Structures are given as C-alpha cells and as structure tokens.
Amino acid sequence: MVVTVLGISGSPHRHGNTETLLDSFLDGARSAGASLEKVVLKDLNYTPCRGCNACHKTGQCVVKDDAIILFGKVLAVDCIAVSSPIYTMGITAELKGLIDRGQYLWARKFILKTLYFSDEHIQRHKGLFISTAGQNWDHVFDGAFPAITAIFNGTGFEYYDNIIANNMDEYKGIKNHPTAMNEAFLKGQKVVGVIAKLKGG
Amino acid sequence: MTIKVLAFAGSPRRHGNSETLLDWVLASMAEDPDVSIEKVPLTEANINICRGCNACEQLNKCIQRDGMDIYHDKIIEADCILLSSPIYCMGIAALPKALIDRAQVFRSRKYVLKLPVVPPERKGKRLGAFIATAGQDWSYVFDAAKPSVKCFFHLIDIRDADISYLMINKVDEKGAIDRHPTAKAEAERLGKTMIAELKTRLAA
C-alpha cells in the first residue's frame, strides 16, 4: 500500500528557506516510495474564519472555498507536513488563516460528536511541522507549536516530529545550515517507512 | 494635551466578546476629555498579509498599497495602542496576525536601516495593551499569543514593561463576556490606569 504524503507550504515567499526545507522532506519521502502532493497556500483562495459558529450547529463551514477542499485532502492522506516560517514569533497569517478554518472539524468532534479518530487511526497518521526562523533564540518556535498541535488534533494526526532550524539570518539561508536539509530528507524517508510498516505494507 | 488612542479590534466577529471587552476599556478612557480615540475593526481595515519579500529592508516602506498606508502613520502618531483578539486554535486570530506581521516594516527600519520608529523624545511615553478572550478555560490558553503580541509592540517602540494584558478565558458564545463577574470592572480599571499613566509620562 502506497503511503500518501501532503506537504503544505505556508510561506508567502516562494522557494524561501521554509519551502526549501519542506522540499527536502518531500524528496526524502519520495525516495522511500511515497505518493506526494504539495500545496502552496499562497496559490489558494480562502478567507479567514469568520467566527460565526454556524458550524457548531451544522458541522459545515458556511464559506465554501479552497480551505475546505484542502481539509478534505488532509483527511485523506497518511502524513502531512505543515510548514511556515516564523514571522513575529508565530506562524504566518496565511497558515493561521487555514488552521482557524478547521473549526468545523472541531465542532464535529466536540459538539456534534460526528467525527471520531480512534487511537489506532491517530497512530497511523503522522504530522510534522517544518519551520525556519531568522532569530537565533531557542524559544523562537514556542508560539507556533500550539496552533500546529491544534490542526493535527483536529484532523486526526499524531504530532510526530518537528523539523526546525533557527538563526537563518546568520546562516544566510537554509542551504548553508550544517544539518537541517539532510535531517529533513532523512525524516521524510523515515516517516514513510514507519507508516508503511503500520499499514502492513 | 490630547492623548491619542488607537485601538484595533481584531476579531472577525463584530461586537463579540473580545470587541466588547475592548469597548469597555475605550469607554472608560473616553470619560477623560483629553482623550481622542480611534477604533479600527480589522474586518474593515483592508490589511493584506506580509509577502515576506523583505523589500522594506531596502525601501524603508512596504511595497503593498492598502490600509496599512494609513495605519502605519497612525501607529506612529498614537500615544496608546490597543489590540484585541479572540483566541482561535490556541493563538491570535489570523486577522490580527496579519496586522502584526506587517509590522515588519518597523523591524526593517529599526534593525536593518537603524532608523528611529518614533522620535527619541516620545520613547518610553507610549503604552500598549493586548485584550483577549478565549472559549477554553485552560489557564495557558493565551500563552502562544503573547510572543507575537510582544513582538508587535516591541517593533513599534512600546516597551515590554509598558504592555498591559487583559485576558479573559471561558467566554465563548456571543455575549458571554457580559455575564463574566469581573471583566467589565477590570476593563474599566485598565482604561483609567493607562490614561493616568500616560498623563504623567506626557507631562514629564
């Protein structure tokens, strides 16, 4: 059974440090035989959550746009790699805009109780967070993790790993980072192998 | 002496809990005749997201022409800046995050071009406040929002020590804030305290 991997690029800046790191992860996944799709949020058309809470009653979002199509894809794959650079100590507005739109799934899980992920499902579905930051502070990613946890929880993925690299300002780009690109490639390979084993393939 | 207050209402839902909390702060400030208030709902502010192009590092301005052309100047002119947001998915909503990310132009000005954001005589005389509500009752529900908020105020020359936080959790449905036992009093107290502090600093 082929392992399916979806990479989501949350940077408004095409082919920058974060997207390059995501690409390395996806290359690793490809080399392990995964079937890939990469989505660039910048190219999609979606609006932020309106906070109308209509989904709390219906389980559906009143806004029909690319965000809903993308959540459909997320729910159908084995592995997601969600990526964003750190802007002002958090994920980009673009990625936050997408994550907030998952409210209808939260409503299905916790209010309507029409969506349920078994422990076994969650274990077989792996989520990774890929990020870069200009700052060299160790805590520069801390503000990002809770929102990433939220999207993984909402869509039934185990928060499997992070591939994060700070201090980009000093390295002058991800390609000069001593370990990150290789780490991303190897983690791409590894997670596909782990999922394949869990799927019994 | 006129004290200029600029308030960004960050929720996509108009007149919900976080905006109501902000309104209470503003109403208590407005009781002082020396205070002039401008409230900006971000739903109407036409602020695009940062494109991450870094052109501001050279140009000292953003290449995008949108609502930020107006609010860039107003942010510099204000003595007091308030930002309100609900917590969505453990962080601030996407709309206020877009405003915060657009402060990149101030970061470039300060740290790349080494130019002042506000004139030296106004440094230390600006106050900021983050006003937030969350549905969850977890005590840590605001933790991930604070680093971005601090970053925003830092970039616009409002010091860490000069940021106030009014964060009320366990309010979800529209109007829930009205039934909160202390929120309104806390908001009014915050408004009064900030204006009194600004008067002292601006007179000095």
Image (cartoon, rainbow, N blue to C red):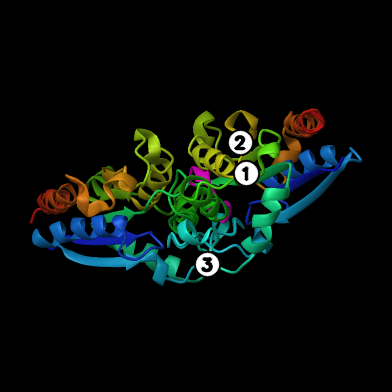
Please tell me which of labels 3 and 1 falls first in the chain: 3
Queried whether the magenta region covers residue A27, the answer comes back as: no
Above or below, comparing residue B118 to residue B58 in the picture: above
Magenta segment range? B89-97
Q: Residues within 10 Å of mark 1 (few under 14, many from 20)?
A: some
Query: Which corner quadrant holds the C terminus of chain B?
Result: top right
Above or below, comparing residue A180 to residue A39 in the picture: above
Front residue of this view, candidates B3 and B58: B58
In this figure, which residue is indicated by the disc labeled 1? Answer: B172
In this figure, which residue is indicated by the disc labeled 2? Answer: B170
- At 62% from the left and 58% from the top, the residue drawn is A52
1 and 2 marks in contact (CB < 8 Å): yes
Front residue of this view, candidates B169 and A176: A176
* Label 3: chain letter: B
* Label 1: chain letter: B
In this figure, which residue is indicated by the disc labeled 3? Answer: B63
Spatial CA distance of label 3 from label 2 is: 40 Å
3 and 2 marks in contact (CB < 8 Å): no
